[in-house]
Amino acid sequence: MKKLPKKIILSGVVFLLSYQAVAASFYNEEDALRLRLRNDFRRAERPSAGSDKNIYAWVQGAALEYNSSYYQDIIGVDIGGFYVYKLGARDNWSTRWYLDGHDSFGRYTAALKLKLSNNLSIKAGRMVTDSLYSGQEDLPIINASSQRTVPTLSDAVLMKYSIDKNYDIYAMYRYGVYYYSDVAEGVHRTGPIDPKSYRHDLFRPQYITSLVFHDSCNYYAASSLWQEDVALQLMGKTTTCYPLAPDRKDKLKAEFTAFYANLDGMTAELDGPKDTSLLSGQLSYIHPVGSLFFGVGKTGGKLNRIAGIDTDLGYPFDLSIDRNHSDMWSYQLGATLNMPGNSFIGIAETLTNGYETYHHDVRIRGAGTNLLFGWQAAQGKLQGLKIFVALNRAREHRNGSALGDRLDYYDSKVNIQYDFTMK
């Protein structure tokens, strides 16, 4: 395994010492076999979850993945097996989608790759579509970060056409998908959620297109999705860095995300708003010593949960309190400090202000503190090992809510991951 760059990644709802450079290399055009061992521990009290407020899960995950080169420079395969073994859970407590209820479970991937030219390639079958897991480009709508032991998966046909070294076009026909909250249903057909069974019994494929520009310091991506009886979705992301001087190692980094969804057909007939939106941005000052960052986000009306569209896509993050209720503002100020031994510590303060539902009958004011620690082994026999710990305390005031006027949260999360790659 190659030596990893020493850097901090701030990504959506979590930031940690990143293995993305190594993870991305696994998906390059060469034969590679990777064993990923991941141990996840979660203990939390989340009163907004109602009867599932007590959370405890301890699991051991194992993923064996093989990505081939292109035989005769034309055809290849990408296959994998994922298994999550229960180490700990408690009766009548939630496992927060780390397990299938309280049971161990497995998933698999199997996709065929075709290289039609140096600029055009196609992948078809079941594949990983999780940028945080894979380290690949964060394609809006196509990719989603699972934050769980098993990554987001898609049954799909994906085409990539490279116009030149900076511009790429993606097109996807997706007919099946697996998000972390689908652990009980498994990989399922794409379509609207049945209000009675809470399953995806009606098939409606997704048609997705993306245009991406990237260079050494900039990333711009725009995606659209059309799905009959569900929604039209539009999403854009930008990342730009500004070196403060040619001879300096510090820089500013600006990130922005915009999202819009308009419900269609039977999903539009559900109670609640017919469309929603999100605007969010983050400005970071990055220095070899550490980083400072400030993020803000604003959501539109909260859709009916059966719509299956989540607006928790902004940069302010918190282990406990949501940032995606109706017409909710969220703010975050934080810092990280790089420590000796390839480790870091961090703190992030989050504030929220919005409404419990689109009726605006219960106002939510929340505050949370996140403490973070990360370490990775950059060399020696432990190279490939990383540890991430997050601790959280938070409180929400919801005067008049059925959940209570004051909700107190705590959360602890530990992730230990080891990657062993053979090429």
Image (cartoon, grey):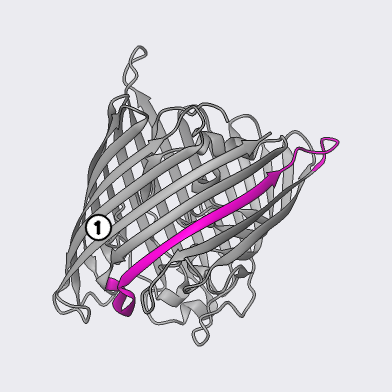
**Residue 420 falls in which quadrant of the image?**
top right
For label 1, the residue is: 329
Q: Residue at x 67, y 53 (%)?
A: 80
Q: Judge whether 400 appears above or below 299 on screen.
A: below
Tell me residue 160's x, y (percent).
67, 44
Task: Name the residue nearer the viewer: 185 or 82.
Answer: 82
Q: Is residue 71 left or right of residue 369?
A: right
Where does the magenta region start and end?
48-75
Q: Amino acid at mark 1?
A: Trp
Q: Is residue 42 left or right of residue 166?
A: left
Tell me residue 243's x, y (percent).
36, 22
Task: Name the residue nearer the viewer: 374 or 26.
Answer: 374
Q: Residue at x 31, y 35 (%)?
A: 344
Q: Judge whether 411 appears above or below 380 on screen.
A: below
Task: Name the residue nearer the viewer: 168 or 1.
Answer: 1
Q: Residue at x 59, y 71 (%)?
A: 228
Tell me residue 331's x, y (percent).
23, 51
Tell me residue 190's x, y (percent).
61, 69
